Image (cartoon, rainbow, N blue to C red):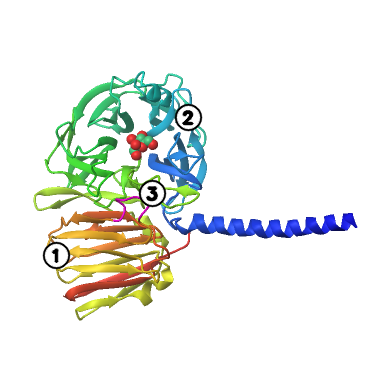
Amino acid sequence: MKHKILKITYFCMLVACGLGQNTAIAQQKNESDQYRPAFHFTPKSHWMNDPNGMVYLNGKYHLFYQHNPNSSVWGPMHWGHATSTDLDHWDHQPIALYPDSLGTIFSGSAVVDVNNTAGFGKNALVAIFTHHNHKIEEAKTGLHQYQSIAYSIDEGKTWTKYEGNPVLPNPGIWDFRDPKVMWHTQSKKWIMTLATKDRITFYSSPNLKNWTKESEFGEKSGAHGGVWECPDLFPLSVNGIQKWVLLVSINPGGPAGGSGTQYFVGDFKEGIFSADHTDIRWLDYGADNYAGVTWSNTGNRKIFMGWMNNWTYANQIPEQGFRGATTIARELQLKKVGNEVYLSAAPVKEFNLILDKAAQLKYSAAKTDYDLSTKVTSFKGKYQLELTTAQKQSFSLRLTNDNGDELVLGYDAKNNTFYTDRTKSGQVDFEKSFPRVTTAPRISKDNHIQLKLILDVTSAEVFADNGLTVMTNTFFAHSPLTQLHIKSTKPLLIQNLKYAGIKSL
Ligand code: FRU
C-alpha cells in the first residue's frame, strides 16, 4: 500500500514538475524573446556592448563584441565572436578573448597582417585591444588601461595573446583606450587611432608591437560633453578626391543625450589629422547608435556597425536573458552638399537580400492620411518602408498597436528637422531620460524628401535623404507596432512608396 502511494505521489510529482517546468520554460521564452530583435545581431545570452575587431577575411565578416558572458549587465569584459558571409545572418562562435592577469578585454580592432609584419604568420589576424585592469582601477594605484595584441592563425577560431603585452603602456592618461588600427599605404606603417581622454592620439608602428606617438587631435575641436571613446580613421573619396574621416564616440554629450558619435572630415598627412570644418557633426542623431566603427580589409568599401544602445540606460533596458544589439550594417560614403562634404550612412546592399514580399505603391493625388495598416500588419512590426514626397512638407509616420503604444517619426518643415518621438512607445519608465523626442537637422537641399525606415522589434532606424541624416532609436512596445498611418496637416503627395517584410533568418 505504502509502495502504491509512493508511486502515485511520484507520478503526480512528475506531472506537476513537468507541467511546472513547461510553464516556467514558456514564461522564460516569452519574457526573453519579447524584445529580442528579429534581424539585428544580439548575443545568444547575457550582455553585449561595443562591436569590436570587425574584420573581413576569406569571405567572412568577423564581428567581435564587448561581452559579459555571466550576466545581463556590464561586467568583466570578454570579446564575444560571430561570423557572417552576408552581414545579415550571424553565426555565434566561441568567445575569442578572455580576461587575464593584465586585465579584462576592452574595445579594439583587428587587422589582417598580409605582409607578416608582426611575425605571427602571413595573413594572421591580429587583434589590438585595451587591457583594463580593475584591480589597479579600484586601488587607484596606477594607470589601468594599456594596449595589447593577440593573434589567430586559423581565421579567428583560436587566439593567442602576445607574450610581450602590453605593446603600448600607459603614458599617464586615465582614459587611454579603444585602439583602431589600419595599414597606412602611404607611409607603409600601421596607424593606431586611440581615444585618450578628451582627444585622439595617433601612433605608428612597423610591426604592431612597437608604437611611436605621431600626433594628437581634438583637444579644441568637436563636442566635449564627455569622454572620447572608440575612434576610427579611414580614407574615403568624394568626386575623385581622397579625404579622411575620423569617427569619435563621446559619452555623455551625444546629440540626443548620453552616448553619441561625432565625425570629422579632413586630411591625414604625415601622421597629423586636420579637419576641414569647425562645426560639430553627428553620424547619427538618434539616441541609440554608439561606439560604432568600420570593418577592416574591405577595400574601398567602408562598412559600419554600432552598438544600438546608450550608456544612460543600457543596463536597465527591459530585455531578459540577453541585453544589447548592434545596428544593421551600414555603408558610409562622403557626399557633397553645396560646398560642404558630409558623411552619409545607408543600409548595406546586402540588407536587400532579407527583404520579403516587396511591393510598391504610386499615388497621384495628395492626401492628409495614408492608412497603410492593411499593407504592413502581417509583417508584425518588422519591415522596411521607403517613401519619396513630391514636396518639402511636414509629415509624420504613426506606428501604433492595440495597446495604445505609439512611435511617431517624420519631418518638420518649419524647423527643417527630422524627428522620432518615443515618449508613448511602450515601456519607457525604466529610466527617466528614455521617453524623449530626438531631432536631426536636414542636410539635403532637395525638394523631395526621401525617407527609409527599418523597423525591428525594438528599433527604428531612419535613413533620410539616402543617409545624409540618420536617426536610430530603440523602443519597447507592449506588442508589435502593426498599424501605420502617414499623416500631414496639409495634403501631401507621396510619389513613391515601397514596403517589404523581412525574411525570417
Ligand atoms: C564604449 C566603452 C569603451 C570601452 C568599453 C568597455 O562603450 O566604454 O570605451 O572600451 O566600452 O566595455
Tell me if label 3 and label 1 are in contact, CB under 8 Å: no
Q: Residue 92, image x and y in percent?
A: 50, 46
**Above or below 66: residue 438:** below
Q: Residue at x 28, y 37 (%)?
A: 232
Total numbered circles: 3
Q: Residue 323, image x and y in percent?
A: 44, 48
| Residue 421 is inside the magenta segment | no
Q: Residue at x 34, y 56 (%)?
A: 349
Q: Which residue does the numbered mark 2 point to in the structure image?
A: 99
The answer to which of 128 and 442 lies nearer the viewer is 442
Please, what is the three-letter code of the amino acid marked with disc 1?
Ala
- Give how far apart the Cα atoms at labels 3 and 1 are: 31 Å
Q: Secondary structure at mark 3?
A: loop
Marks 3 and 2, the one that precedes in the sequence: 2
- Overall secondary structure of the magenta section: loop
Q: Is mark 2 within 8 Å of ligand 1?
A: no
Q: Which residue does the numbered mark 1 point to in the structure image?
A: 413
- Give how far apart the Cα atoms at labels 1 and 2 are: 51 Å
- Which quarter of the picture shows residue 391? bottom left
The answer to which of 83 and 459 lies nearer the viewer is 459
Structural crowding at the residue carrying mark 1, measured as other residues with C-alpha within 10 Å and reported as few (<14), some (14–19) or many (≥20): few
- Give how far apart the Cα atoms at labels 3 and 2 are: 23 Å
**Above or below 427: residue 232:** above
Q: Residue 78, image x and y in percent?
A: 46, 35
**Above or below 423: residue 230:** above
Residues rendered magenta in the picture? 429-435
Q: Which residue does the numbered mark 3 point to in the structure image?
A: 326
- For residue 153, say whether it is visible: yes
Marks 3 and 1, the one that precedes in the sequence: 3
